[in-house]
Amino acid sequence: MKKLVDFLEEEMKAAFEKAGYDPNFAKVTVSNRPDLCEYQCNGAMAAAKTYHKAPIIIAGDVAVHLEGSEALEDVQAVNPGFINMKVKKEFLGSYTQEMREANQLGVEHDSQKRCIILDYGGANVAKPLHVGHLRSAIIGECLKRILRFKGHEVIGDVHLGDWGYQMGLVITELRKRNPELVYFDEQYEGEYPEEAPFTINDLEEIYPYASAYAKEHEDYKEEALAATFELQNGRKGYRALWKHIMRVSIADLKRNYENLNVTFDLWKGEADAQPYIPDMVKMMKEKGFAHLDQGALVVDVKEETDTKEIPPCMILKSDGAALYDTTDLATLVEREKLYHPDEVIYMTDKRQELHFVQVFRCAKKTGIVPEDTKLTFIGFGTMNGKDGKPFKTRAGGVMRLSDLIHGINEEMYKKIAENRTVAPEEAEKTAQMVGLAALKYGDLSNQAAKDYVFDLDKFASFEGNTGPYILYTIVRIKSILNKYKENGGDMAECRISEPHSESERGLMLEAAKFTAVMEQAYEELAPHKICGYIFDLANSFNRFYHENRILGEEDKEKQQGYLALLDLVKDILMTSIGLLGFEAPERM
């Protein structure tokens, strides 16, 4: 289904051509002055230089050829050379009805289906999820859904930090506390226990303690580094402990991610890349890509056009140890072998941009990925407290994600209980749904690359540009449609007709933008575009709701048109929040 703006642009191109001008000037956009017109074309200004004519003359020539347009009822050439347009009400009614009947509300799949791996999450095992993991999970999940909505095969990979120094710290502290465990007996030849000798609560206490202790005691740190080395080089007892840590941690991580309505297709980590490292390093050496620099093995990735220094990509440290560069490159080797992706997208903190510049250039230079495989980095900003600094607990520590979610759910439960519109047995579940909407919308409504202030009072409000406001609008529409059906009405008989008032027209125009907004959000990988749009759509609906009698409308045909339009708006809002990663309750 064509975007409404594409219909208008086709007619504009034909008019430019008939008037003797290049149709490439016929770009149509939504008006930035809605008080004057609905759509506009500024092409006459650009064409003036080419044709040595005043822009208003060109605009007037073009406007003449738009008389009798299928889609436009009012076209005006306005000084200094704008072409202002208003959509024909019959066309607007039929277009929005067609949206209502179309698959995916008129949003089409891309003509070429691609395989895309989306690397997001990035949690470290043996540690609890904290607020620093929030943005990667929320934005990544939304992008996965947008890409799938456009018809692509998207593989979400959590890409766990499961092979580094934190493992050595945990093993070292376990050995210090329980030296009698068989995992530390190098002579042990039997089977290792199936049950882990610790719980997730133990791990969440052990890791921060060991990390802090290592910073103060160099001998302990060296012991942890040695344990990491032995684990990575196959010591059986440590590998068995590692498997326990992975099993216990992943079960907990899955619970936490499920509370965010975030899922992954792959639960792979740095450890999965290890088997690919030796052959990858050998290839880089044999083909002359890698060389020694102060004992470390590196690949030069700087380019002549660089305006700032791009350091070499370090493959192995002077002691032979692998780094993040190494495991990220080896992971690309694995992904190419198993999935042959057309694109790999990485969702991490924007401060890691240099790392990914180095890795991407090295991967292309060495042929780890084909030249036509797209490698994309999306860096997100920091979630800050009201003081403008990274979000912390009141005690000054990093807040656990589970504590943050619990706090939001409690806040929403109080508000819902005060309203007394939801039965007590439903209130808790509803609070969780509204709390998740508050959290996700509060994040996604900001441009990903920018820092933002986490303000619970603002995010949890039922008014303004918030998740709860969007949900409240959906619930209001559902309530109207349900009452109509309960009173014997049949939605199958309802069709959108031409608008009868300015508020109805405004709502139709806003609904008609959906396909264009989705295209933009997809092309720019920008969830905030969807948030901005549904806020405008919700505002348009609420204006229409307050200015028109809907269920009390006596003209049956007009009432059915209203209800069909509400049905479309509800579907757009429900589809949009589904892409953002949350749901709407039946009551609030």
Image (cartoon, rainbow, N blue to C red):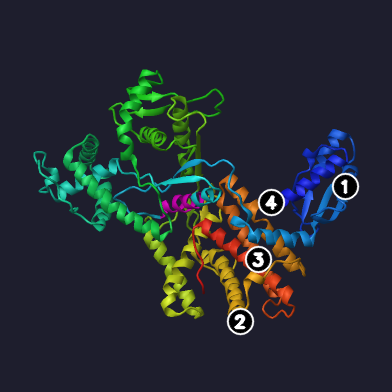
Q: Which residue is mark 2?
A: 487
Mark 2 and mark 4 in contact? Answer it, CB < 8 Å. Answer: no
Q: Residue at x 83, y 49 (%)?
A: 83
> Residue 241: x percent and y percent?
20, 46
- What is the distance, in whole Å, between disc 2 and disc 4 at their CAs? 36 Å
Assign a secondary structure to mark 2: loop
Residue corresponding to mark 3: 539
User: Where does label 1 land, which residue?
Assistant: 65
Range drawn in magenta:
131-143
Q: Please tell me how many numbered marks the rendered image carries.
A: 4
Which amino acid type is shown beneath numbered disc 4? Lys
Q: Secondary structure at mark 3?
A: helix
**In the image, 464: left or right of 434?**
right
Q: Comparing marks 3 and 1, which lies closer to the viewer?
A: 1
Q: Amino acid at mark 1?
A: His
Q: Amino acid at mark 3?
A: Asn
